[in-house]
Image (cartoon, rainbow, N blue to C red):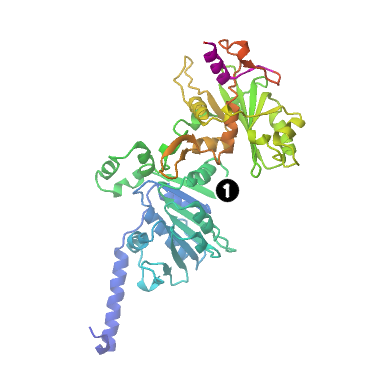
Amino acid sequence: MDIKSLSREEKLELLAAIEEKRRRAIASKPKYMPNKGQAPIHKSDAKERYVFSANGTGKSALLVQELHAAATGYNPWSASKTKAPSKICVVVDNSKKIDEVIMPEYRKWFDVDEKWLKREGKPYTSKIHYPNGSVVTFYSAEADPMTFEGVMFDYVFIDEPLPQMLYTAIKRGLRIKGSPSRLLFCGTAVSQPWLKTLIWDKWSNGETTDVECFRVGIEVNEHNLGDGYVKRFSATMSESEKEVRLRGGFFNSDGMALAHLWKRSVHLVSRKDLQWDPSWPCVIGIDPHPVKKHNAVLLGVDPNDRLVVLDELAIKCTASEFAEHLKRLMAGHNVIDIVCDSLGSMDTTSAEGFDSFIQVLNDRGLKVRATRYADKSHEDLVDRLQSGLLIPEKDNFGQSIPKLRVAGHCTGIINDIESVGWQRNKMTGEYRPKLDTSAKDYLSALGYALATDLFYSKPQRMRPSMLTKSPYRGIDIVQRRSAKMSIRRNR
C-alpha cells in the first residue's frame, strides 16, 4: 500500500483501523491471576525477596509481572503507587534467555511497542525504554562483575542462581537515595550453594531484616501443565533431584554431609526443655584464628550420656579479651576440659606480643590444652557427627532422642551442621570423604570438643590405666583411641 497516495480521510481511517486492531490485541491478552505460590510473593513488602522454586511453577510470569509493576509505578496487588520513572536491572543466567523466554512472556501479558526496545549492538534485547522514562537493562550472569561498578538501580530482578561475587556487585547498585531499593530473586537452586547458607539459612534463623524467602513446589502450577507432565518429568530423577526440581529445595543434596540426618524438630532443644544441671560435665572446644573471629563451643553430657551443645561464642579480639569472654561462657557449668586447635600454640597467635594464644589463656587461669593429631582426624569427626545425629528407634518410653543435640539459640553451629558439605576435587568434580570445614569454624570447634570422648561417668569396661586424669574437678576423661591402641598392644 502506497500511503503517500492516500487522501487525508483514508489515512485517518487507516490509523483508526490500526488503533482498533491494537485495542483488540490488548483485550485478547490473558488476564494474569497469581497461583497460590505466586500470590504471597506479590503481596510481600520486604525489600529483598528470594523465591526458591521448582521447575514449572510460573517463575517467568512472576518475574515479568513484578518487572512491569516496577516500571509503570503501580502495584496492582496492593493497589499502591511506586516510584516512576525507575532504573531497573534484570540479570539472567544466559543471554539467549532474554529473547527466547523473557520477551515472549512479556508480550504474552503486555502490549510492547518495538520502539521501546534497544539492542545496543548485541544479538539480543538489552534495554526496554518505557514511555514514562523507566529503563529496564538486561545483563547476563556471564558478565564481568566489574561491569556493575558505579551503576545504580531502583530495582534488581535476578532470574536463576548466579555467582556470589556477581550478586554482591549487583546488590551494591541499590544505593540511590530515596529509592525503593528492592531485589527479587526467582530461581531453581541447582547451583550456587551460597544461596542456602547466606540467604535461606540466615533468614530461617532470624538473622536478617527486611528479607523474606519463599519455597515453591511444582504443585502450585500443575493445573497449567500437560496431563501426566510431572510424572514423565520426574520418572528418571533421583530423590535429591526431585527435592530441587519438584519441591523447590536446594541443590547438591548428595554433596551435603549431615543435612540428611538433621531434623530441627528432633535435634534442637529449647531453653525451657533443656533443664541443665550445673554439675553435669562439660568440655569446651576452641578454634582460634589470627584474622577472623575466635570460635568456641560448650558441649555437655547428661546422665544418659547424651551430648548437648549448650552454648557458642564467636568474637574477634585478643587472647586476653577472649579469656574473659570464655570465663563468662563457663560460668555455672562443670567444665572438665578445654581443648584448642594446635594453631593456638604458635608464637604471636595471641595478638599480644610473642606469646601464643593458648599460653595467654593459661596465664589467665584457664587450663587449655592443644589438640593432638588424632583430635583433628576428618574420619573420626565424620563418624562422631553422623553417629551422634542419627535418630534412633523409639525406646520403651516412646522417645527417640539422638546422642547429639543442640540448644536452639546456638544458630552458628546449627547453620554449620545444616550446610556443611563434602570436600570436592577441583579437577574431577567428585566428592571426597572429608568435611569442607574451611568456613565452618563453629563445626571445627565442636569437632575438638567431641574428640575428648566426653562421658557422664567412667565406663566400667575401661581399665584405670587407660584413663587420663583431667586437670579440672569432676570426672576422668576417657581417651577411647588410646584405649583401643593399648588393648591391641596387650593382646
Give above or below for 181 relative to 237: below
Extreme residue toward the left, this view: 1
Write the residue at 34% across / 43% down.
219
Residue to which mark 1 is pinned: 209
The answer to which quarter of the image holds residue 67 is bottom left
Residue 357 seen: yes
Q: How crowded is mark 1: few (under 14 residues within 10 Å), some or many (20 or more)?
A: few
In front here: 184 or 308?
308
Residue 139 placed where, x, y %? 44, 62
Write the residue at 36% across / 59% down.
97
Q: What residue type is labelled 1?
A: Thr
Q: Is residue 55 left or right of residue 139?
A: left
Residue 292 placed where, x, y %? 64, 44
Residue 332 placed where, x, y %? 70, 25
In front here: 4 or 463?
463
| Magenta-tinted stretch | 474-490
Is disc 1 placed on a helix, strand or loop?
A: loop
Give above or below for 256 relative to 20: above
Residue 189 placed where, x, y %? 42, 46
Write the residue at 36% across / 52% down.
58
Residue 75 seen: no
In front here: 193 or 487?
487
